Image (cartoon, rainbow, N blue to C red):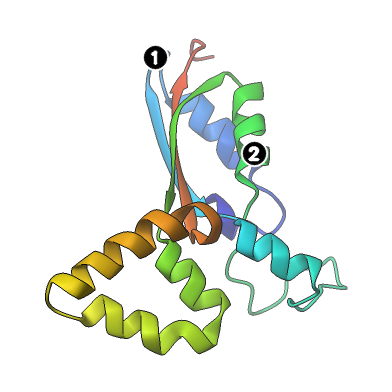
Amino acid sequence: MIEHFYYGYEDILAEMKRVIKKDGYLFLTFPYMSILRKLKVKFNKYKKFKDTTEPDNFYQFALDYKKVLSDLEKIGFELKNKKFLNGKKGLKDEIIVLEPWIRKINQGRGFIYKFLRKILSVTLDFWAAHSVLLILKNKTKLK
């Protein structure tokens, strides 16, 4: 949900901090600036925003998980685990010409398709993940 705030997620992080007791856990997922997405930025494959006002059709950002993690650590959360999620979706969304093949693999029955799905998940989740899951523990008392 933090990815849907055009002007930043600081207020929502403060609210998370306020309501999660000491030693309580936060499970946070958000679309992530994967290696694939960073490459597309480097090669100017996304439309650039020129206006600082929120566009009418704004939906979400893909965020740098290291920046989000740093922001959470600054307010007292400690990372316990992270997992990159759904590399197949990330690849399908970012390289449209692969969508029919990925759909076929996802819908396929039998050992070969199951094997291909597993291989794709293992290999794609790191560099093309659609989102990331951060599991964090609040190390400070409520205010």
Judge left or right: residue 3 versus residue 119: right
Q: Residue at x 73, y 76 (%)?
A: 46
Return the mark for residue 78. Answer: none
Q: Position of residue 143 (x, y in %)?
A: 54, 14
* First along the sequence among labels 2 and 1: 1
Q: Position of residue 140 (x, y in %)?
A: 52, 11
Q: Position of residue 58 (x, y in %)?
A: 64, 73
Mark 2 closeness class: few <14, some 14–19, many ≥20 residues within 10 Å: few
Going by the numbered disc 2, the residue's amino acid type is: Lys
Quarter assignment of residue 109: bottom left
Q: Position of residue 84 (x, y in %)?
A: 45, 49
Q: Residue at x 53, y 85 (%)?
A: 96
Dot 2 falls on a residue whose secondary structure is: helix
Quarter assignment of residue 104: bottom left
Q: Are marks 2 and 1 in contact (CB under 8 Å)?
A: no
Return the mark for residue 23. Answer: 1
- Residue to which mark 2 is pinned: 66
| Residue sticking out furthest to the top | 141
Judge left or right: residue 32 versus residue 40: left
Dot 1 falls on a residue whose secondary structure is: loop
Residues 49 and 80: in front is 80
Q: Is residue 87 visible?
A: yes
